[in-house]
Amino acid sequence: MNERMHTVVKGGFMFLTGVMVGAGTGFLLAPESGARTRRRLKAMAEDLGERVGDLAADARWKVDRAIERGKRLVA
């Protein structure tokens, strides 16, 4: 993985971590019942998990595509 791609991945991870921490803090400080807050946090975590999975699959596809292009250039 080149340096630029590493920086993009690292920045994306940091952004997602910040979003999760901010959302969690907001929900914990919100004036709602504990049960409702836990349900909302669970739903958000599941949604985030799906999004991360989609992003990982997309990244894998792009890397595989780049590898194939590289192989064609070398051959």
Image (spheres, grey):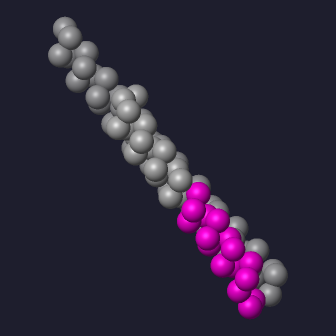
Q: Residue at x 57, y 62 (%)?
A: 18
In the rendered view of the protein, which quadrant contains the C terminus? top left
Counting labels gives 0
To which quarter of the image does residue 44 belong? Answer: bottom right
Residue 19, percent from left and from top: 56, 65
To which quarter of the image does residue 59 belong? Answer: top left
Q: Is residue 43 visible?
A: no
Q: Establish if 54 lies above or below 27.
A: above
Q: Establish if 56 lies above or below 30.
A: above
Tell me: 53 left or right of 67: right
Q: Residue at x 31, y 23 (%)?
A: 67
Tell me: 60 left or right of 43: left
In the rendered view of the protein, which quadrant contains the N terminus? top left
Q: Residue at x 17, y 16 (%)?
A: 73
Tell me: 22 left or right of 2: right
- Judged from this view, the residue extending furthest toward the right is 34
Q: Name the dominant secondary structure of the magenta segment.
A: helix
- Judged from this view, the residue extending furthest toward the bottom is 31
Q: Is residue 71 visible?
A: yes
To which quarter of the image does residue 64 belong? Answer: top left
Q: Residue at x 74, y 91 (%)?
A: 31
Q: Establish if 68 lies above or below 43.
A: above
Viewer-proximal residue, 26 or 67?
26
- Judged from this view, the residue extending furthest toward the top is 75
The residue range painted magenta reads: 17-32
Q: Establish if 35 lies above or below 9.
A: below
Viewer-proximal residue, 2 or 31?
2
Q: Is residue 31 magenta?
A: yes
Q: Is residue 62 magenta?
A: no
Residue 11, percent from left and from top: 46, 50
